[in-house]
Image: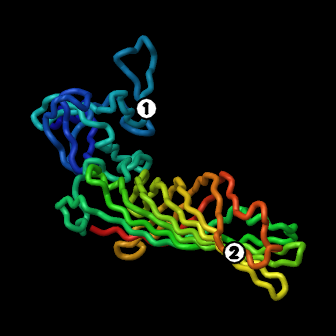
């Protein structure tokens, strides 16, 4: 039987962990048997040239002249090679699950396997994941990061012309605490809370000789969601966002000569936030490096003060407030995120 097969077939070797032989050239055909990695079988030759140096032609059609055949096996449009089972029954095997053995220099021109990872290899690499094979729906992520970004160029409407200004970088801390939702078996969607604490400072010189410092603090907290849109072994890309309630506190110190006047302006706002972040996995045990960019949209609001004016010349008597027009700003975060159960 083997000699008959060699007459019309080429030898091949299975290059995946396990592959089925089908009754027809379709993935939903009846499976006749399985072959394991390293087992040899025979593939219908299809008149492939027996040597890269010799010409082969179809002797069954002499009237059409010599028909030359390729040096390598061509994969049929169905994606299956025809073969036989161990009992000699005709069968079909996926073409990318086997490698044709040419036993000549053509071996150097063909890949051993086209796969970076064997799609049929279901085995788990050691060590096994923690708590395997128990599925634990309770997974948590906690992050703490240094946050910074540009200020919005907004200031108190001083009664004197501004001759110099210095808007310093807005900086502070960001954190979130989130839990995997119960209905997500793929460990991608998390929901919880996040918050910010920012400080910023701006210096102003006025034509009247007054020097003013505006110190602003913003405390934000609100609901937060995160969805892992892309994951590989060492890297995760997530889309995230939420809405925060913000407490704005601006302290303005205005000094003219020996006279120092200080007042505090404050207000509450709501801010929608959207962004994305990258997590480089396991930089430390159970801890990832975390970096992200977030965009915040702001509705118009005003900061007002109930503090008395010590020197009326430093303050605008008609518009004694700080007005923020609609706008947006971005924040960059750099920090760590811990995942635990």
Residue 319 appears left or right of 31: right
Circle 1 packing at 10 Å, graded few (<14), some (14-19), many (20+), is: some
Instruction: Quote the CA–CA distance across marks 1 and 2.
Output: 94 Å
Circle 2 packing at 10 Å, graded few (<14), some (14-19), many (20+), is: few
Q: Secondary structure at mark 1?
A: loop
In this picture, is 243 found above or below 198? Answer: above
Residue nearest the observer in this picture, 13 or 203: 203
Residue 150 shows in the view: yes
Residue nearest the observer in this picture, 101 or 113: 113
Q: Which residue is mark 1?
A: 70
**Residue 308 numbered tag:** 2
Quarter of the image where one finds residue 332: bottom right
Kindly check if marks 1 and 2 are in contact, taking CB atoms under 8 A apart as contact.
no
Residue 338: % across, % down: 38, 71
Quarter of the picture holding the C terminus: bottom left
Residue 7 shows in the view: no
Q: Secondary structure at mark 2?
A: loop
Residue 336 appears left or right of 4: right
Residue 252: % across, % down: 70, 75
Residue 198: % across, % down: 58, 71
Q: Earlier in the sequence, mark 1 or mark 2?
A: 1
Residue 290: % across, % down: 47, 67
Total numbered badges shown on the rendered structure = 2
Quarter of the picture holding the N terminus: top left
């Amino acid at each position: 039987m083997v000699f008959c097969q060699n007459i019309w077939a080429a030898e091949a070797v299975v290059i995946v962990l396990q592959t089925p032989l089908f009754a027809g050239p379709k993935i939903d055909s009846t499976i006749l048997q399985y072959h394991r990695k390293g087992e040899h079988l025979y593939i219908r030759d299809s008149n492939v040239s027996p040597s890269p140096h010799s010409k082969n032609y179809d002797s069954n059609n002499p009237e059409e002249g010599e028909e030359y055949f390729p040096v390598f096996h061509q994969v049929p449009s169905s994606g299956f090679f025809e073969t036989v089972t161990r009992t000699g029954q005709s069968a079909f095997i996926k073409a990318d699950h086997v490698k044709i053995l040419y036993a000549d220099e053509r071996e150097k021109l063909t890949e051993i396997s086209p796969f970076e990872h064997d799609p049929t290899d279901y085995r788990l690499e050691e060590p096994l994941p923690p708590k395997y094979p128990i599925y634990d729906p309770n997974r948590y992520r906690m992050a703490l990061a240094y946050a910074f970004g540009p200020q919005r160029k907004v200031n108190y409407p001083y009664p004197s012309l501004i001759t110099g200004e210095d808007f310093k970088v807005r900086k502070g801390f960001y954190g979130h605490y989130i839990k995997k939702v119960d209905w997500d078996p793929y460990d991608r969607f998390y929901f919880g809370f996040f918050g910010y604490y920012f400080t910023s400072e701006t210096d102003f010189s006025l034509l009247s000789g007054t020097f003013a410092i505006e110190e602003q603090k913003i405390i934000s907290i609100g609901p937060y969601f995160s969805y892992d849109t892309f994951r590989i072994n060492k890297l995760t890309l997530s889309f995230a966002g939420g809405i925060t309630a913000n407490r704005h506190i601006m302290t303005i110190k205005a000094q003219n000569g020996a006279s120092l006047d200080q007042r505090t302006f404050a207000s509450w706002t709501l801010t929608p936030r959207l962004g994305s972040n990258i997590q480089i996995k396991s930089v430390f045990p159970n801890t990832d490096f975390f970096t992200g960019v977030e965009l915040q949209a702001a509705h118009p609001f005003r900061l007002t003060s109930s503090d008395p004016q010590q020197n009326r010349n430093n303050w605008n008597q008609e518009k004694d407030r700080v007005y923020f027009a609609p706008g947006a700003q971005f924040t960059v975060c750099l920090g760590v995120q811990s995942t635990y159960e």
